[in-house]
Amino acid sequence: MTPLRGDGFLPGLRSRLGSGRPAVGLRRFGGLRRSRPLLAGPTEQAPKRIVSWGLASIVDAGLILGVVTMLCGLAGIGDDSVDAAVFSCVGAAGAALAAVAQRRVAPPERPGAGRVFAGIGLLWTALVLFGAVLYAGTGALARFDDALVESAAGFTTTAVTLLDVGEVSRTVLLFRSATSWVGGLMALLIGVVTLPVVLRSTALIGYTTGRRGLDLVPSAEVGTRRVLILYSGFTAACVVAYLACGLGVTDALVVGLGSASTGGFTGRVDSLAGFGSAVHAVAGVGMFLAGAGIFVVWWVVRGRVRPLWRSQELRTFLLLIAVATVAVGVHRDIGWGEAGFMAVSMMSTTGFAVADWTGWGPSATVVMLVAAGIGSMMGSPGGGMRVMRARLLMGSAGGELRRQLDPYALVLVRRDGETLSRRTLDRLGGHQIAYVVLVGVGALLLGISGVSMLGSVWGSVSAVSTVGPAMGEIGAFGQLGDLGRPARLALVPLMMGGRMSIPPLLAGVGLLLRTYQAAERRARYRMSRRSVSEESGNGDG
Amino acid sequence: MASGPEPATAASGQGVQRGQFRSATLHVVGIAVAAVSLGMLACALLEAVTSRRDTTALVVSALVAGAAGGLLWYFSQPGEIRTRQIFATVAWTWILTTAVGALPFILAGTFAAGGVDFVEQVVNSVFESASGFSASGSTVLADFETPGRGLMMYRQLTHWYGGMGVVVLAVAVLPFLGVGGLELISAEAPGTTSDRLTPRVSETARHLWLVYIGFTACAAVAFFAADGFSSLYDAVAHAFTVAATGGFSVHADSIGHYDSVAVETVAIVCMILGATSFSLHWRAVTTRRLPYYRDSEFRSYLLLLGLAATVIVILVWLDNGLPLGSSIRAAVFTVVSLGTSTGLSNATGPGSPGDYVTWVAGAQLVLLVLMVVGGCAGSTSGGIKVMRMRVLGLSMLRTVRHAQTPRAVIPIRLGRDTVNETVVSRVAGFFLLHFLLVMSGVLVVTALEGDFVSALGAVLSALGNMGPALNEAGPTSNYAVAFSQPARLVLALLMVIGRLEIFPILLTAMGVGVSWYRAAARHGRFSVRMLARRLEAIAESRSTDV
């Protein structure tokens, strides 16, 4: 792997749109090639650089988001001209600002894991705020808190909404899906490129992709380029497939973006229930590939069968989908097609629905809850605990049973042939505890906000897994209208916590703890100084 | 049985002799069942001098149990105990004790009211017995007036036996069981480790039982005084319950029957003491000092209960519109009752302040968290235990710090002690298995009948040995209304699994399953291919139906 220490998560893009200045900044990127700047400044003087991993990531993401917003605005011309103009202008301005800022902001050469995680948290917050300002500013949603919820749902690829899709303009509809597409892209780049390269070890397994990551991501630059191409290509393929099934351009774009990103937004109130079986089939395949992750798409594109066959995670993912399908499909009033579709939808954490599954009976819905909790594969834009983690934890639990019988037994837990250390497994356990705690706290928050028991538990699992639809008040199609305002707001940290996959959240908590400890130390130091000065004052007197 | 009794002497043609089978499992099971039969006999005496309704059932049960236990004890002798046998011994002791403990209910026809068929009676009796011995307190009993006082006292006594543990009782009377005795206690006792109070294991077990008996006696006196010296029967019955943190009561409306602040206060104090480590009680008795506040686990436990009570008081006061005084009374009692895994209720009827299923969802969720946490390690309570939760919490915080400094070596400390990494790993493994069991339990129970919330509440309650759960399995209802027969059996199994903290039953079941599979495969009666063929046949029949 090329030693790309201190890259932002879009070094490939940076190199292509880079500043064009001589080596000073670029050398720090470990050999990015020089290229023409997107917006060449009038002078060639080296501007002062701000070194921050979080800011650099926000600038990179802002560039993509700006371009995407502008395209949404342009696509809306002829529908609602005000929305189209606002989104086009804001998008263009945002992209231009980001391009300029790229010259002034650089990531540090050796960012620590804590800074990276804190930066990720900052990035998601910035994205959500940007979306909220746009929703509220254009009047798509009257209140800022509602706009915040809608934006968070979009960027975290959670299929819950407050928008009345029949009333809003084409631009807003496309922007909503675009937010989930950008959110999915960010999740992929962070999970597949940034963390494995920056953290460079399996010490934080569960956050990284392990050895198979080297295949797709030999270096940050190449990895970023490949992920961008694969993700965009996959999205385009989905959109073309939907068009071929007879969907209109707007619907195809909205559903295509929702499928590729596991976002789950559609242009209708009843999700995909009103569409035909061909659309359902395409959505099923799209969701499966999106949930299976970018590695599987890469292998499929390259026609490589062996890694597909040898991937333990893919086998487990398929097995779990099959088991969930059978467990739901054995109910006499549920068709096998519906059962399979919903199993894939829940496992991939997309949230599309072809029927009101909340009336399917407790056992079928509990199966779906478990499927949503486990979630998708590593390297996918989906959420949940992740199949690989669940698999490793099962191995760990089996090992614990064996150790009960023989305390000195050497229990090895492997991932794709790679033996994991006990320390790694302990950290994985810590991650699982954090996940359960997040779900529990979420359920408590929702319960305190006035949501029913059923709605609280389901809503929390669904939000943390970034699925969206849930039993209870939220319902099968992710409509948040029946939810009280505090409950809606309670969903925001849950969706973001689930999207960031815990570590950044934990890093944020860690940062707060450290800040508190530092403040405490300072206060203690001041107290001791004061007492010393008082004593010396008394002595003088 | 997994331990496989071996003949101690080659005595072919001479019949079975005393100590013929060298098996610690049979020996311990024999003693435990015999001990339970003594309890039945005592309750038969009480029944004989009070209502006389169920005397025959109790006497016959005592004779059957006594004979079975005596025979097992007589014809077996404890040999060397291996690790696998320790788990098998504990698991079989509990399973057989539960089965034998159901006899009085079956013979007395306790669940025969309303023309219930025999199978359902047996299922209900086994459920009640499992709930009693595991100190859960979940009940299927709807009619509290018909059974005699002796039988009701026997129901309370099952709690008392199960609270400290029938295996601990067996070890206490087995002076020769030095090797493996502590492991037996550890396999049964709740918590991360079991303290050795004295150098001799059997002496440790005896001391634990002495403290337990003393505590029960004190609780009985306190209840008797708080109730205005009106009923010694009630006082003793509830003392059995609070000492074991069980949850059964002799009244349908539990502690709510008295509607007395004094009785509720006594119950609260006793429940908290019951959920405190018995090693601390032993230290308090022997040193004549109160070591409770110095124990960091106990402090954390009190803090947790206080925090939960405060949150619930606020929620119930604001959202349910109850007066502040009623809110405090109902919330504090319920928090302590569920937080200690006892399950007594101060609800005076459906919709009364103590009926927590009518509380706002947030308050019920706090109660669910308490059900999961349980009491202190080394106590009679259930749940994951405060000690484990602290280790888990610190482990999670360590993950937080590792996210910032991946290579840092960060030990986990409880008070002044550094926790061994093996213990941390075990605790994480235990939590994971608990989590998996909850998920599997909810899946199975919902598949067998029951809505999601009821199933989740019942499974958490069963694994945490709590008693009442949510919705129709709440404090003013019973499990017969909420769950089907098979679901009740699953919950009964979960209660025993929860009481033994998962490993003994799981490992024994796995051992039995593996040996059966091997035996069947050896005789060609079962193979994976046959299983696949069977599944194909089921699929075909289903498609034909459609």
Image (cartoon, grey):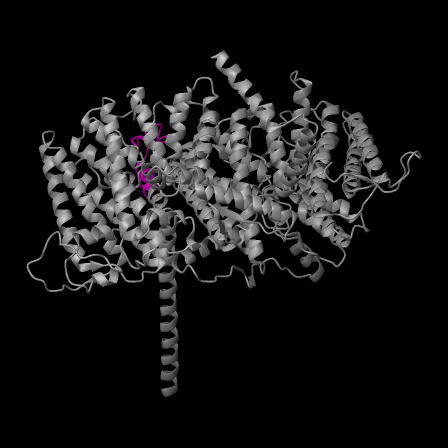
As rendered, which of B391 and B373 lies closer to the eye? Answer: B391
- Taking the image as shown, residue A299 lies to the left or right of residue B530, namely left
Locate residue B159 relative to residue A79 in the image: left or right: right
**Which quadrant of the rendered structure holds the N terminus of chain B?**
top right
**Of all residues shown, which one is farthest toward the top?**
B545
Q: Nearer the viewer, residue A373 or B215?
A: A373
Q: Measuring from the top left, give residue B75's x and y in whole percent.
A: 85, 38
Side of B175 relative to A300 (left or right): right
Q: Nearer the viewer, residue A335 or A145?
A: A335
Residue A393 seen from this side: yes
Count of numbered marks: 0
**Residue B19 vertical position relative to residue A110 in the rendered view, above or below:** above
Segment colored magenta = A469-492
Residue B313 in sight: no
Q: What percent of the width, then of the height, locates residue A79?
A: 11, 29
Q: Is residue A476 magenta?
A: yes
Position of residue B428 measured from the top left corner of the image (x, y, whole percent): 53, 49
Does residue B333 appear to the left or right of A191 in the view shown? right
- Magenta part, dominant SS: loop
Q: Position of residue A385 (x, y in %)?
A: 42, 42
Q: Residue furthest bottom?
A: A540
Residue drawn where x is 27% and y is 40% of the image: A231
The image quarter in which residue B200 lies: bottom right
Observer-nearest residue: A426 or B431? Answer: A426
Q: Is residue B521 magenta?
A: no
Q: Residue most toward the left?
A: A42
